[in-house]
Amino acid sequence: MPTYANSTSAVITIGDVRIEPGQSVKTLQFIPGSLPAGITEVTTAPMCNPIILSSKVTGNTTVTIPETYTNPLTGIVEALNGNYLITVYAGTGEATVQFNGSGTLKYVGLYERYEYRCMSRTVDSIVLTVTGTTYVTVQAI
Protein backbone atom coordinates (compact mmCIF):
# COMPACT_ATOMS: atom_id res chain seq x y z
CA MET A 1 0.00 0.00 0.00
CA PRO A 2 1.21 3.50 -0.64
CA THR A 3 2.53 5.15 2.52
CA TYR A 4 2.76 8.90 3.09
CA ALA A 5 4.54 10.74 5.92
CA ASN A 6 3.81 14.15 7.38
CA SER A 7 6.95 15.99 8.54
CA THR A 8 5.09 19.17 9.47
CA SER A 9 3.51 20.25 12.77
CA ALA A 10 0.04 20.55 11.20
CA VAL A 11 -2.66 18.04 10.28
CA ILE A 12 -2.84 17.68 6.51
CA THR A 13 -5.92 16.31 4.73
CA ILE A 14 -5.71 15.30 1.08
CA GLY A 15 -9.04 13.99 -0.23
CA ASP A 16 -10.06 11.22 2.20
CA VAL A 17 -6.55 10.85 3.68
CA ARG A 18 -5.85 12.60 6.99
CA ILE A 19 -2.22 12.66 8.14
CA GLU A 20 -1.39 13.82 11.66
CA PRO A 21 1.90 15.68 12.39
CA GLY A 22 4.82 13.22 12.38
CA GLN A 23 2.56 10.35 11.31
CA SER A 24 2.97 7.87 8.46
CA VAL A 25 -0.25 6.62 6.89
CA LYS A 26 -0.83 3.56 4.70
CA THR A 27 -3.66 4.11 2.27
CA LEU A 28 -5.45 2.09 -0.41
CA GLN A 29 -5.22 5.02 -2.82
CA PHE A 30 -2.41 6.88 -4.45
CA ILE A 31 -2.44 10.63 -3.91
CA PRO A 32 -2.41 12.02 -7.44
CA GLY A 33 -0.49 15.07 -8.58
CA SER A 34 2.06 16.98 -6.55
CA LEU A 35 2.10 16.46 -2.81
CA PRO A 36 1.66 19.33 -0.34
CA ALA A 37 4.78 20.71 1.34
CA GLY A 38 5.91 18.42 4.16
CA ILE A 39 4.24 15.29 2.76
CA THR A 40 6.52 12.62 1.35
CA GLU A 41 5.73 9.33 -0.32
CA VAL A 42 7.51 6.67 1.76
CA THR A 43 6.52 3.57 -0.25
CA THR A 44 4.79 3.12 -3.57
CA ALA A 45 3.79 -0.52 -3.13
CA PRO A 46 0.79 -1.51 -5.23
CA MET A 47 -2.66 -1.17 -3.75
CA CYS A 48 -4.10 -4.54 -2.83
CA ASN A 49 -5.79 -6.27 0.04
CA PRO A 50 -3.76 -9.36 0.96
CA ILE A 51 -5.60 -12.67 1.12
CA ILE A 52 -5.08 -14.06 4.60
CA LEU A 53 -6.99 -17.30 4.15
CA SER A 54 -8.65 -19.06 1.24
CA SER A 55 -10.48 -22.39 1.49
CA LYS A 56 -12.57 -24.62 -0.73
CA VAL A 57 -15.09 -26.37 1.53
CA THR A 58 -17.03 -29.46 0.45
CA GLY A 59 -18.46 -30.61 3.79
CA ASN A 60 -19.33 -29.41 7.26
CA THR A 61 -16.30 -27.82 8.91
CA THR A 62 -14.96 -25.05 11.09
CA VAL A 63 -12.49 -22.62 9.54
CA THR A 64 -10.18 -20.91 12.04
CA ILE A 65 -9.03 -17.37 11.29
CA PRO A 66 -5.29 -17.05 12.02
CA GLU A 67 -4.02 -14.57 14.59
CA THR A 68 -1.09 -13.57 12.33
CA TYR A 69 -0.33 -13.63 8.63
CA THR A 70 2.63 -12.83 6.39
CA ASN A 71 1.96 -9.70 4.37
CA PRO A 72 2.83 -10.64 0.76
CA LEU A 73 3.87 -7.07 -0.07
CA THR A 74 6.35 -6.64 2.77
CA GLY A 75 7.14 -10.22 3.83
CA ILE A 76 6.54 -9.15 7.44
CA VAL A 77 4.43 -11.21 9.84
CA GLU A 78 1.57 -8.99 11.03
CA ALA A 79 -1.04 -9.45 13.76
CA LEU A 80 -4.60 -9.83 12.51
CA ASN A 81 -6.33 -7.68 15.14
CA GLY A 82 -9.11 -6.51 12.87
CA ASN A 83 -9.83 -4.84 9.56
CA TYR A 84 -10.57 -7.97 7.59
CA LEU A 85 -13.34 -9.06 5.24
CA ILE A 86 -14.88 -12.54 5.38
CA THR A 87 -16.50 -13.73 2.15
CA VAL A 88 -18.48 -16.96 1.75
CA TYR A 89 -19.57 -17.95 -1.77
CA ALA A 90 -21.69 -21.01 -2.63
CA GLY A 91 -20.38 -22.28 -5.97
CA THR A 92 -22.60 -25.36 -5.95
CA GLY A 93 -25.29 -26.28 -3.45
CA GLU A 94 -25.77 -24.05 -0.44
CA ALA A 95 -24.27 -23.25 2.94
CA THR A 96 -25.07 -21.88 6.36
CA VAL A 97 -22.56 -19.71 8.18
CA GLN A 98 -22.18 -19.12 11.89
CA PHE A 99 -19.42 -17.07 13.49
CA ASN A 100 -17.62 -18.34 16.61
CA GLY A 101 -20.09 -21.24 16.84
CA SER A 102 -22.92 -19.07 18.18
CA GLY A 103 -25.40 -16.47 17.07
CA THR A 104 -27.64 -16.31 14.02
CA LEU A 105 -27.13 -18.72 11.12
CA LYS A 106 -26.67 -16.95 7.79
CA TYR A 107 -27.96 -18.76 4.70
CA VAL A 108 -25.94 -18.60 1.47
CA GLY A 109 -27.78 -19.96 -1.57
CA LEU A 110 -26.41 -21.22 -4.87
CA TYR A 111 -24.27 -18.52 -6.55
CA GLU A 112 -24.84 -16.15 -3.65
CA ARG A 113 -22.17 -14.39 -1.62
CA TYR A 114 -22.20 -13.37 2.01
CA GLU A 115 -19.70 -10.77 3.25
CA TYR A 116 -18.91 -9.64 6.77
CA ARG A 117 -16.46 -6.85 7.69
CA CYS A 118 -14.61 -7.22 10.99
CA MET A 119 -13.28 -3.88 12.14
CA SER A 120 -11.93 -5.47 15.33
CA ARG A 121 -11.07 -9.06 16.16
CA THR A 122 -14.66 -10.24 16.68
CA VAL A 123 -14.61 -13.45 14.62
CA ASP A 124 -12.12 -16.23 15.41
CA SER A 125 -13.85 -19.11 13.61
CA ILE A 126 -16.43 -19.73 10.90
CA VAL A 127 -18.70 -22.76 11.31
CA LEU A 128 -19.95 -23.95 7.91
CA THR A 129 -22.67 -26.45 7.04
CA VAL A 130 -22.21 -27.12 3.33
CA THR A 131 -23.95 -29.10 0.60
CA GLY A 132 -21.90 -28.87 -2.58
CA THR A 133 -18.86 -26.60 -2.76
CA THR A 134 -18.42 -23.33 -0.91
CA TYR A 135 -15.45 -20.94 -1.04
CA VAL A 136 -14.28 -18.94 1.98
CA THR A 137 -11.79 -16.08 1.91
CA VAL A 138 -10.49 -13.75 4.59
CA GLN A 139 -8.93 -10.60 3.18
CA ALA A 140 -7.18 -7.68 4.88
CA ILE A 141 -8.94 -4.36 4.35
Image (tube, rainbow, N blue to C red):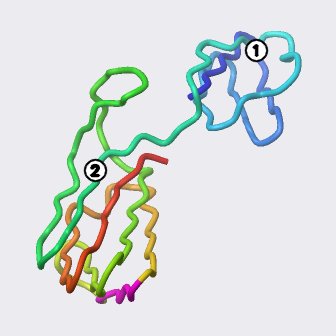
Q: Is residue 44 above or below residue 69?
A: above
The dot on residue 90 is none
Q: Residue at x 59, y 34 (%)?
A: 47
Q: Amino acid at mark 2?
A: Leu
How many labels were placed on the picture? 2
- The span shown in magenta is 105-110
In depth, the one of 36 and 33 nearer the eye is 33
The picture quadrant where one finds residue 22 is top right
Q: Is residue 140 above or below residue 55?
A: above
Residue topped by disc 1: 39
Task: Please state the horizontal and vertical placement of residue 78, each as a whole percent of the image.
Answer: 31, 32
* SS type, badge 1: strand
Residue 58 is left or right of residue 106, and the answer is left
Q: Amino acid at mark 1?
A: Ile
What is the distance, in whole Å, between disc 1 and disc 2 at their CAs?
Answer: 34 Å
Q: Is residue 14 above or below residue 99?
A: above
In depth, the one of 23 and 61 nearer the eye is 61
As for residue 27 lying within the magenta part, the answer is no
* SS type, badge 2: strand
| Mark 1 and mark 2 residues within 8 Å of each other at the beta carbon | no
Q: Residue at x 23, y 63 (%)?
A: 56
Task: Please state the horizontal and vertical placement of residue 60, each as a whole percent of the image.
Answer: 12, 79
Task: Please state the horizontal and vertical placement of residue 34, each as a whole percent of the image.
Answer: 88, 16
Q: Residues within 10 Å of mark 1 (few under 14, many from 20)?
A: some
The picture quadrant where one finds residue 45 is top right
In depth, the one of 73 and 14 nearer the eye is 73
Task: Please state the horizontal and vertical placement of residue 53, each as a whole percent of the image.
Answer: 28, 50
In the image, which is nearer the foreground, mark 1 or mark 2?
A: 2
Q: Residue at x 25, y 75 (%)?
A: 133
Residue topped by disc 2: 53
In primary-sequence order, the first of circles 1 and 2 is 1
